[in-house]
């Protein structure tokens, strides 16, 4: 991992996905939590996309960035990570080694979700 100026750890706010039913229809809503994820944001390269496509069972998927964080996961698949006016939807959470030492969030940057 290379730490260049401007690519240091940043604080991402976590919004948790909540699913309810309204008149029998499923409704998805996001609620702010007190959790902050300190992580390093990086663009996903084509090699990562090729290695991860089997997890989504599709050849084209929307993986755009990865966020590497120290410690156990504080967010889960489907949650949102917010950095200023940028919104990242979590596609996959990888607790590297299952030891709680570091976590990789595979995310998609979204402009239509606020």
Image: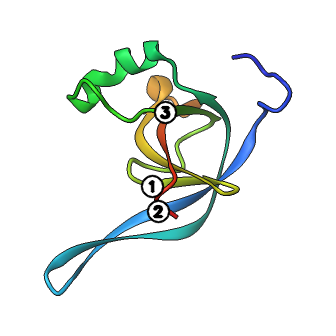
Q: What is the tally of numbered marks visible in this picture?
A: 3
Of residues 57 and 31, which is closer to you in this image? 57
Percent of width and height locating residue 10: 74, 43
Q: Is residue 92 rendered to the left or right of residue 27?
A: right
Helix, strand or loop status at disc 2: strand
Helix, strand or loop status at disc 1: loop
Percent of width and height locating residue 19: 30, 69
Percent of width and height locating residue 18: 37, 68
Q: CA distance from mark 3 to mark 2?
A: 20 Å
Earlier sequence position, callout 3 versus callout 2: 2
Percent of width and height locating residue 80: 50, 55
Q: Is residue 92 rendered to the left or right of residue 25?
A: right
Circle on res. 79: 1
Earlier sequence position, callout 1 versus callout 2: 2
CB atoms of marks 3 and 2 within 8 Å: no
Image coloring type: rainbow
Helix, strand or loop status at disc 3: loop
Q: Mark 2 = which residue?
A: 16
Looking at the image, can residue 101 be seen?
no
Q: Mark 1, residues whose alpha carbon is within 10 Å: few (<14), some, or many (≥20)? A: many
Q: CA distance from mark 1 to mark 3?
A: 16 Å
> Which of the 4 image quadrants contains residue 58?
top left
Q: Mark 3 = which residue?
A: 64
Q: Quadrant of the N terminus?
A: top right
Q: Is residue 83 rendered to the left or right of residue 59?
A: right
Give the residue displayed 49% in from the left and 71% down from the top.
31
Of residues 63 and 96, which is closer to you in this image? 63
Most distant residue in the top direction: 47
Most distant residue in the front direction: 112
Give the residue displayed 45% in from the left and 16% down from the top.
46
Q: Mark 3, residues whose alpha carbon is within 10 Å: few (<14), some, or many (≥20)? A: some
């Amino acid at each position: 991992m290379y730490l260049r100026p401007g690519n240091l750890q940043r604080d991402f706010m976590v919004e948790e996905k909540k699913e309810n039913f309204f008149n029998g229809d499923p409704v998805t809503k996001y609620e702010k939590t007190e959790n902050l994820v300190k992580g390093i944001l990086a663009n996903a390269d084509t090699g990562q996309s090729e290695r991860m496509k089997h997890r989504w069972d599709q050849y084209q998927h929307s993986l755009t960035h990865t966020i590497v964080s120290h410690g156990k996961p504080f967010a889960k698949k489907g949650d949102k990570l917010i950095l200023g006016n940028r919104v990242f939807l979590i596609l996959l959470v990888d607790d590297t080694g299952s030891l709680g030492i570091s976590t990789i969030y595979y995310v998609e940057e979204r402009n239509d979700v606020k």
